[in-house]
Amino acid sequence: MTLLARCLALLVAVTSVAAADLHPIVEVQSGYLFGASGDGKWIKAKEAAKSLADQTTYRVYGLTQQFGEAKSGGKPKSEDVPCEQTLSVPLSPKPGKGLIAIAAPWNALPRKVQVVDPTQKVYLDAVRDFLKTKSIDQPKVKIDNIIRVDLDGDGEEEVLISATNYFSQDNGVPMRSPAGSYSVVLLRRIIAGKVETRLVEGEFHPNACVGKEDSFDAPNAYKVIAVLDLDGDGKMEIVVGSRYYEGEATTIYRCDPKKFEDVLSVGCGA
Ligand SMILES: [Ca+2]
Ligand SMILES: [Ca+2]
């Protein structure tokens, strides 16, 4: 097969997921379309939008429970400038609660998600030890949330820790990172009888961002907002919200035994 023929064959394979097998995923409050899962693949919003039916029934999920259903009332449309690359799907009735909606027959919350006390010493110590490995010598540990769930369904619970400290008064994210600031999402799991802490997403600023008056590094704050099986393989993906001083995004991470892969993302920012 020539290279061109191979590329075409691949293109056909990628685009031939039938509409019925497409499971569109929407961020509930913004209406942003992540894209879809289908046939073991993750399909970006622009591609998924071509095959979406006008009327699709979505199940609406929050962090720990399902909040009923909503219907899409039309084709995905582009957001206004500067976010014209972002597609949104109007849901009706607009759910008052819920974070992620997916049109899929399976239960996206196959196992119980528990939010646990974020002040437990064992987790504060775990975050402190991790930050020290990233050259933050005297970490000021501030945990936003801790979630306990069996992500992969092997009977052993994992723990997701979101911790951020930009030393801001109002919990906002500054334009410039102060010295010793950070934001992380960590996964703690037991591997062969030993606890292992791994980085899902994050950034570390051992030194302050300094420079000319108009220079800045626009650091991000990350936090787990949902844990859902969004492709129906029985393993739960991690949904992380991130924000910086003038925008925000939400990203779906697939957990592989070896790595975390961001599969779909939505957002808007300047
Ligand atoms: Ca597990
Ligand atoms: Ca999954």
Image: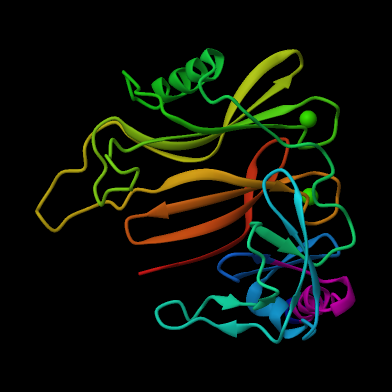
Question: Up-down: is 191 above or below 58?
Answer: above
Residue 244 position within the rendered picture, expressed as x and y whole percent measured from the top left:
37, 54
Displayed quadrant of residue 60:
bottom right
Q: Main secondary structure of the magenta part?
A: helix
Q: Residue at x 64, y 58 (%)?
A: 97
Q: Nearer the viewer, residue 160 or 145?
A: 145
Q: Nearer the viewer, residue 177 or 119?
A: 119
Question: Up-down: is 154 above or below 69?
Answer: above
Q: Nearer the viewer, residue 136 or 56?
A: 56
Q: Quadrant of the N terminus?
A: bottom right
**Residue 7 within the segment the image draws in magenta:** yes
Q: Quadrant of the C terminus?
A: bottom left
Residue 229 position within the rendered picture, expressed as x and y whole percent measured from the top left:
78, 50
Q: Residue at x 49, y 59 (%)?
A: 249
Question: Up-down: is 225 above or below 23?
Answer: above
Displayed quadrant of residue 263:
bottom right
**Residue 76 within the segment the image draws in magenta:** no
Q: Residue at x 72, y 83 (%)?
A: 73
Q: Residues in magenta?
A: 5-25
Task: Please indicate whether residue 66 sits to the left or right of residue 86 in the image.
Answer: right
Residue 154 position within the rendered picture, expressed as x and y whole percent measured from the top left:
85, 30
